[in-house]
């Protein structure tokens, strides 16, 4: 009988992508996916450690699964992702009923590890970094929407002082150009219209081509734009440090690149950026945005912000607020600084109390929300290209999809529009979505 698999994923799109890879591998081994952990034969937890409480959250979850294991001794529990990579065997010390610990770079070994775990009562652990065979073309994640994530590189060499990623994802590795092109062509044949290129620093991409040549990110963009059927290109995350002129130039040459860029700056204070080891100044950041705006008049920028970094003064915070206003950021992600074990910033003195940090976060988020709404309001009466994703859950005579700048637009239409890019006139603005009217179908 087919075995049932339940998988829970925390964290970023990279983890989502890894989980899809796991599902695809195990499906080829006749496993069936279930959304009910109680009926599963295998439970997989793909963890995230970017901010604190990751460990507590993990043991909480495992505690719940322990009850299921008590009822079913053959149940296999596997823990993977960033916490697993970081903590390794220590997880087993606190939860000795788990069977497998796998890392961010060993997801491809999971089927083998499961087979092994079924035969032995011992813990199976592999959190190594050195076998670069993760991206096996046979396990291309099957995507359910007309938009697909494609991992193009992984890991990070930047070592920003607050960040755990270089320790949990390892050093930068770029996938080969041919593998990426093959994957995207395959997805395009399945009807995918939009690709979202994933990586911790996509713009440091340096991947080998078939001919041995090394391709830069801007060259990769050009090649992807020539793949039939792909109409939109997004990518995340870029780092300002190597957002070079050739990438900016690509915006003038490749209309398929969306007029929306997530370019995290973290803080508006040079002093804090230096303590964060961000490798660029505010002026350099602004210069990139100016050039981008010249290349694409209507480009919208979003960012990540960390408030309450150790030593952040009221003045530093005000500098961040000023930058938010100057750049006129669209929707952004913002977090209170979280001390990560083993990172250089964890040794810095932090005098700001949590209440103060929460107030700063509140002020910052309020400002960003206002700006998001302002950007949306500017869209009223304009025609937007909407990639239709689904029938509306509230009204089956409507569909919804996304604009280039990630706004959800609902409009009258039927399911034959799903997967198409449609011209839609924006007729109403709500806080989290827009209402539209179809103009033409393409
Ligand atoms: N490569 C990206 C960042 C990836 S991590 C870049 O260059 O900026 C995603 C986001 O999580 C970061 O942008 C940061 O805002 C947030 N983050 C990372 N470590 C954090 C920490 N220790 N505390 C709070 N937020 C953190
Ligand atoms: Fe983290 Fe900085 Fe890399 S935020 S992912 S160390 S660029």
Image (cartoon, helix red, strand yellow):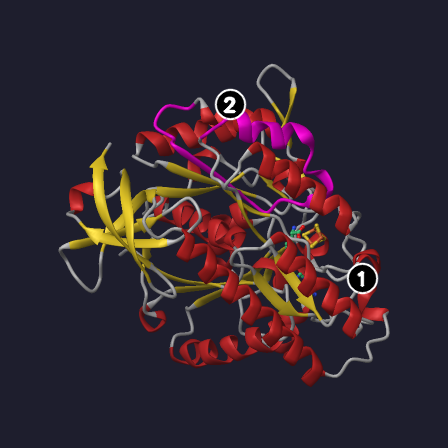
In-image side of 257 versus 395 (left or right): right
Please provide percent x and percent y for residue 36.
32, 69
In-image side of 281 versus 61 (left or right): right
- Circle 2 — which element? helix
**Exactly how many numbered labels are in the figure?**
2
Q: Nearer the viewer, residue 194 or 440?
A: 440
Crowding at label 1, few (<14), some or many (≥20) Cα neighbours within 10 Å? many
Q: Residue at x 66, y 75 (%)?
A: 360
Q: Earlier in the sequence, mark 2 or mark 1?
A: 2
What is the quadrant of the C terminus in the image? top left
Please provide percent x and percent y for residue 378.
42, 53
Q: Is the residue 94 above or below the residue 257 in the image? A: below
Residue occupied by mark 2: 223
Crowding at label 2, few (<14), some or many (≥20) Cα neighbours within 10 Å? few
Q: Is residue 386 visible?
A: yes
Q: Is the residue 71 above or below the residue 270 in the image? A: below
Q: Residue at x 52, y 24 (%)?
A: 253
Q: Is the residue 243 above or below the residue 51 in the image? A: above
Q: Nearer the viewer, residue 345 or 111?
A: 345
Q: Is residue 229 magenta?
A: yes
> Which residues lie in the magenta part?
227-255
Residue occupied by mark 1: 272
Q: Residue at x 61, y 37 (%)?
A: 292
Rounded to the nearest whole Å, what is the CA distance between mark 2 and mark 1?
38 Å
* Residue 89 image-quadrant placement: bottom right
- Circle 1 — which element? helix
């Amino acid at each position: 009988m087919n075995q049932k698999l339940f998988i829970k994923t925390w964290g970023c799109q990279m983890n989502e992508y890894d989980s899809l890879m796991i599902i695809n591998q195990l499906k080829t081994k006749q496993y069936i996916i279930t959304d009910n952990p109680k009926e599963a034969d295998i439970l997989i937890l793909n963890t995230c450690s970017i901010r604190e409480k990751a460990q507590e959250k993990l043991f909480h979850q495992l505690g719940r699964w322990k009850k299921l294991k008590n009822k079913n001794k053959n149940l296999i529990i596997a823990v993977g992702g960033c916490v697993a990579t970081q903590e390794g065997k220590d997880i087993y010390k606190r939860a000795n009923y788990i069977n497998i610990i796998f890392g961010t770079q060993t997801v491809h070994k999971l089927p083998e590890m499961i087979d092994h775990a079924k035969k032995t009562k011992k813990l199976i652990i592999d959190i190594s970094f050195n076998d670069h065979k993760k991206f096996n073309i046979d396990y291309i994640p099957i995507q359910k929407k007309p938009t697909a994530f494609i991992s193009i590189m992984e890991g990070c060499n930047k070592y920003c002082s607050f960040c755990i990623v270089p320790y949990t994802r390892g050093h930068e590795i770029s996938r080969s150009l041919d593998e990426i092109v093959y994957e995207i062509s395959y997805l395009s044949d399945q009807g995918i219209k939009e690709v979202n290129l994933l990586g911790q620093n996509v713009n440091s991409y340096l991947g080998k081509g078939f001919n041995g040549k090394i391709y830069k990110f801007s060259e990769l963009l050009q090649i992807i734009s020539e793949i039939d059927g792909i109409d939109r290109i997004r990518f995340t995350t870029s780092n300002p440090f190597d957002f070079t002129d050739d990438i900016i130039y690509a915006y003038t040459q490749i209309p398929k690149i969306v007029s929306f860029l997530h370019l995290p700056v973290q803080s508006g204070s040079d002093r804090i950026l230096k303590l964060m080891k961000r490798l660029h100044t505010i002026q350099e950041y602004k210069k990139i945005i100016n050039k981008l705006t010249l290349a694409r008049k209507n480009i919208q920028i979003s960012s990540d912000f960390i408030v309450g970094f150790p030593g952040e003064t009221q003045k530093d915070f005000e500098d961040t607020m000023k930058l938010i206003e100057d750049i006129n950021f669209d929707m952004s992600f913002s977090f209170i600084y979280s001390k990560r074990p083993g990172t250089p910033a964890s040794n810095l003195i932090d005098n700001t109390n949590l209440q103060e940090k929460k107030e700063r976060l509140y002020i910052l988020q309020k400002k960003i929300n206002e700006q998001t709404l302002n950007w949306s309001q500017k869209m009223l009466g304009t025609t937007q290209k909407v990639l239709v994703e689904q029938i509306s859950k509230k009204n089956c005579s409507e569909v919804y999809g996304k604009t280039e700048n990630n706004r959800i637009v609902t409009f009258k239409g039927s399911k034959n529009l799903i997967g198409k890019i449609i011209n839609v006139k924006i007729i109403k603005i709500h806080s989290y979505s827009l209402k539209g009217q179809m103009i033409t179908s393409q």
